Image: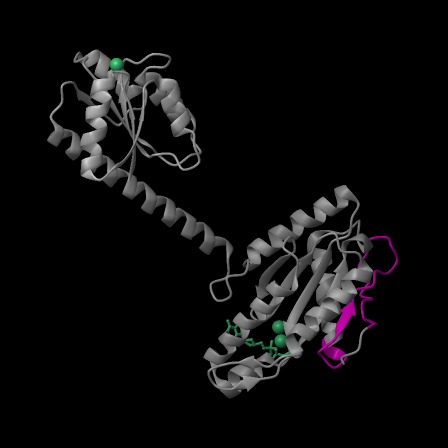
Amino acid sequence: MKILIAEDDPVSRMMLARALQRTGYQVIAVADGAQAMKELDQEDAPRLALLDWVMPRKDGVEVCREVRGHKARPYSYLILLSSKESKREIVEGLQAGADDYLTKPFDPEELKARLRSGERILELEDRLVEARESMRFQATHDQLTCLWNRAMIAELTSREIYRSRREMSCTTLMLCDIDHFKQVNDQYGHAAGDEVLQEVARRLQNSVRSYDVVGRYGGEEFLVILNKCDPINAKARAEHIRVAISGKPFSTHARKLTLSISIGLAFSTDYIARSVEEIIHEADTALYAAKAAGRNCVRIARPGKETGETNGVSADVTLQPS
Ligand code: GH3
Ligand code: MG
Ligand code: MG
Ligand code: MG
């Protein structure tokens, strides 16, 4: 583990560094508070620091205050070293953000014990951050496919549509539904169905650009947001995705299966006066039309009169299954 020593007295600094190196720490030693701050500001900064109280340029208490001012970075455990023993000064150091303090001259065994307690705190901090990240992931992603979940994909759709309206670009919504998926469950079991969903998710993800967004919108329905994608491009991309699913069999533990998806497209530029929910609904209507047309094909939502009222016209036959 990396540790920072900031101590202006060269003899004490060297002795401390040696002792800690022997204990197994990777030591970075500096001679003043400004250099200490520079080290603590690095990307891969040491998270344990021993800071002398009285140092030139910036004293240990100022370093503590400054480090605590940067709330976003990972927690550093700060120990102040001082020859000051008055309660008032110790309180000042702790209030500035020090986690602990040692008065000089200190007992090496006590120092090691206090460093170990610092490491325990840092471990706890790491576990908390990990738990928070994992909770954040679970709250926004679908467990089975690891794609964005329904709430999140709806939120992202809304964000992208508003952005494309500001930028006068076109966002394409692509709603995909696996054809006759229930039969997979019925014939080969739910586990095989799950494997298919995971593989469909992978193929969708691999078929889009890094700034497009893929989410699981429902059981076997996926919503893809194609950013800055005009209608002509979008048709080709949808066709490409359709083939990415139907063109290659799916391996499941039960057997290899050939599957297809139906796709409904809606272009944000066709619905500038409509709500996001209404545009998704239009994509859904187009998807329904693709199902009605025999599945394994793409249909495009067609806006009616551009007045904003519901139109229900959406089943323009444009692409046929190969
Ligand atoms: P269509 O071509 O009209 O879309 O027919 P379909 O069979 O795909 O559609 P339907 O809506 O009848 O069936 C969808 C099935 O998806 C029913 C449901 O049990 C299954 N399903 C939903 N979520 C999951 C899941 O997480 N895992 C598995 N294995 N199946 C799921
Ligand atoms: Mg000093
Ligand atoms: Mg289906
Ligand atoms: Mg469905």
Q: Answer with the quadrant where ligand 1 appears in the image.
A: bottom right
In the shown orientation, is residue 44 left or right of residue 78? right
> Closest to the observer: 118 or 44?
44
Give the residue displayed 47% in from the left and 63% down from the top.
Answer: 143
Closer to us: 3 or 192? 3
Residue at image location 53% in from the left, 81% down from the top: 251
Q: How many marks?
A: 0
Q: Nearer the viewer, residue 315 or 89?
A: 89
The quadrant in which residue 147 appears is: bottom right
Give the quadrant of the N terminus: top left
Is 156 within the magenta?
A: no
Span of residues in magenta? 291-318
Q: Is residue 179 left or right of residue 306?
A: left
In the displayed structure, 101 sits above or below 156; it is above
Q: Residue at x 79, y 61 (%)?
A: 233
Q: Quick check: 32 left or right of 206?
A: left
Q: Does residue 301 sit above or below 140 in this rendering?
A: below
